[in-house]
Amino acid sequence: MTSQPIRVPVRILGIDPGLRRTGWGVIDIDGNRLIFVGCGSVEPPDTLPLASRLLGIHEGLAAVLGNYQPAEAAVEQTFVNKDGVATLKLGQARGVAMLAPAMFGIAVAEYAPNQVKKTVVGAGHADKNQILMMLKILLPKAEPKSPDAADALAIAITHAHHRASAALRLRVVGL
């Protein structure tokens, strides 16, 4: 008689990058069970120069990474809008959000906003209230205090559902 391999939960960090608020959400996935671990946001003061705000985001995410020790991370891709300057600044925050886990040796997956909405709600154009409602169903113990933290949890859930294909893409790119 052979024993079944012991399943080990995988801890995932989801990050919703932003210059004013960078949301973060941590979940564990055990088989197909999702378990809420923590969420919040990093909020550097608006009065700081851009470089200092980016540093604040990095330090905040580094603290989250140190406290929660995730094995995998996922970041939302930048939504390109009509304001080019705002898009570039958001891209800089996103770069910091990708750099922080990479500095801890964690691979970072990327998901489009519509893919996150489709995975969590079932519709690619869902609004924030629909995402929050589904989060209460998927992670009943989660009570995100900001929309950014809720979005970060949705990104972590998306990665939990798509992590096998994300890992395959990373392996193919690394060849």
Image (tube, rainbow, N blue to C red):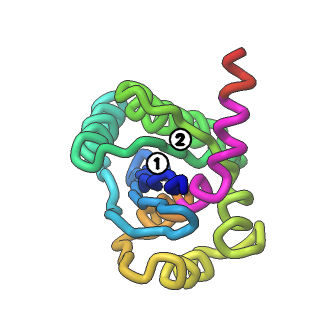
Is 164 magenta? The answer is yes
Q: How far apart are marks 1 and 2 (CA)?
A: 6 Å
Q: Position of residue 48 (x, y in %)?
A: 27, 39
Query: Which quadrant does the C terminus fall into?
Result: top right
Residue that mark 2 sits on: 90
Residue that mark 1 sits on: 18
Res 69 → quadrant: top left
Q: What stretch is highlighted in magenta?
A: 157-170
Element under label 2? helix
Query: Residue placed at 77% from the left, 73% from the top?
Result: 123
The disc label shown at residue 59, or none: none
Query: Residue placed at 24% from the left, 40% from the top?
Result: 66
Three-letter amino acid code at the position of disc 2: Leu
**126 and 70: which one is in front?**
70
Q: Where is residue 30 in the image (x, y as percent from the top left)?
A: 48, 62
Three-letter amino acid code at the position of disc 1: Gly
